[in-house]
Image: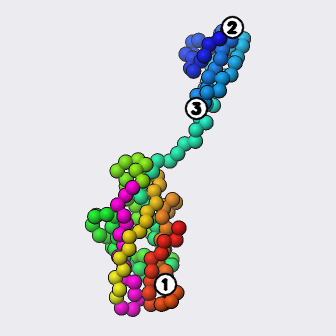
Amino acid sequence: MRDVLSTPSNQCSEGFEEYRIKAACGVYSVMAGRMRNCAIVLAAIAAGLVAAPAQAETRFAKVCIKNETTSNMVFSWRFGTADWRKVTLSAGREQIFTHKLAKVNQNTSPPLYVTYDAKKVGTDIEPKVLAVGYASGDTNCNQAKHHAFRTDPQDKNFITLYSVD
């Protein structure tokens, strides 16, 4: 009896011995008689190799901000100490903010800082530090941390940026 993890193709066409095939997951199968091709051997080995599910690699810190007010929101943002950028987010729209991580599966990033005028009439600059999510893609809000601008229920002149998940 032989333990087989892989067999060269020129050794698979004929054989009269009993083969004990060990798949990568540790399961043994026993085959007796003629081996006419490698399909059985390779199928047993492949079954063990595909047993572990694939996982996406984390490459981006992601935040999505939605404007749930009736006003256009103009605000500034930056990750960590990067330069401030200004964006206008129309009512009902959502915007993704991403930061590429230095290493795959790093799961740490500089915080996302946001400043905005929290008053519809007058001025009240509100600074916020937002929590981030981590994911493999940078073009959509899947696996991002979600935040939303909302009008304060107690003061209709005041807008707050809430974490929504």
Query: Which colour scheme appears in the figure?
Result: rainbow
| Front one among 163 and 15 | 163
Residues shaded magenta: 108-122
Q: Earlier in the sequence, mark 1 or mark 2?
A: 2
Badge 2 marks a residue whose secondary structure is loop
Task: Say what amino acid the circle numbered 2 marks.
Answer: Phe
Q: Which residue in the protein does label 3 denote?
A: 49
Q: Which residue in the protein does label 2 denote?
A: 16
Is residue 34 located in the magenta-colored stretch of the structure? no
Q: Position of residue 69 (x, y in %)?
A: 49, 82
Task: Name above or below for residue 135 compared with residue 37.
Answer: below
Q: Earlier in the sequence, mark 2 or mark 3?
A: 2
- Residue 44 numbered tag: none
Badge 1 marks a residue whose secondary structure is strand
Is residue 114 located in the magenta-colored stretch of the structure? yes
- Residue 151 numbered tag: 1
Tag nearer the camera, 1 or 2: 1
As drawn, which residue projects farthest toward the top? 16
> How far apart in space, not on screen, are marks 2 and 3 (Cα)?
27 Å
| Front one among 95 and 111 | 111
Badge 3 marks a residue whose secondary structure is helix
Residue 41 visible in the current orientation:
no
